[in-house]
Image: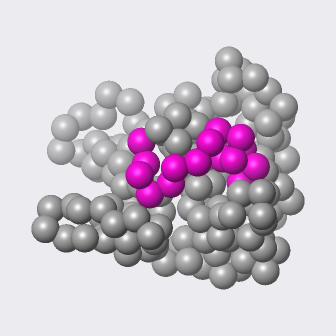
Amino acid sequence: MALIGLGRQLRDASNPFQLTDFEFIRLFRAERETARYLVNRIQGQLLPSRSDGLTPQMKVLITLRFLGFGSYQRVIGQGFYISVSQPTVSRCIRLICDERFNVNANFPGSVHDQFIFNASQVKQEMRRLHRDRIGKYFLLGDSGYALDKYMLIPVLNALLDTAEERYTRRHSQ
């Protein structure tokens, strides 16, 4: 067990769920309850393996950290709570995402997100949900995405103190 001093407080570094709400969201871009829900939902399929020794909880958190920041270097280089190799991060992502999420890794990093989205099943499914009026589903995209009935993007050059400016500020957090 590794103990880490933060201010006047000692904490078990092997349990990120002991972080404050603010620290947890900052590291994983998800609320603690959301992460626990994901762990509970899929932990039966993620037994600890001898090769990496990671618990299902840590595999989910490693994946959330990567998805939240989109960088291996941030996952392995900045976190004292999760110190693992890049191949381990890749294995966790594959384990968590394969057959659970629509993750398309067929395009190199230089391909624009909108191009990948246009070729994805997610776009077709969003169109179907909207067309058939099945619930109210929306995606949050950055300014690089095209505006669509289901794609919410920031309002560029919104005037100060307007609804558009407040929306864009909240959207960008």
- Which quadrant of the rendered structure holds the N terminus? bottom left
Q: Is residue 104 above or below residue 33?
A: above
Q: Position of residue 49 (x, y in %)?
A: 78, 65
Q: How many marks?
A: 0
Compare residues 59 and 38 and report the one nearer the observer.
59
* Residue 45: quadrant of the picture: bottom right
Q: Is residue 107 above or below residue 142?
A: above
Going 59% across and 55% down the picture, which residue do you hit? 62
Q: Is residue 136 above or below residue 41?
A: above
Q: Is residue 79 left or right of residue 66?
A: left
Q: Is residue 46 above or below residue 63?
A: below
Examine the structure image and report whether residue 155 is included in the region drawn in magenta. no
Tell me where the magenta segment starts and ends, as one range: 78-92
Going 53% across and 73% down the picture, which residue do you hit? 34
Task: Determine if residue 141 is in view.
Answer: no
Examine the structure image and report whether residue 81 is included in the region drawn in magenta. yes
Compare residues 71 and 151 and report the one nearer the observer.
71
Q: Position of residue 96 (x, y in %)?
A: 74, 60
Going 19% across and 70% down the picture, which residue do you hit? 9
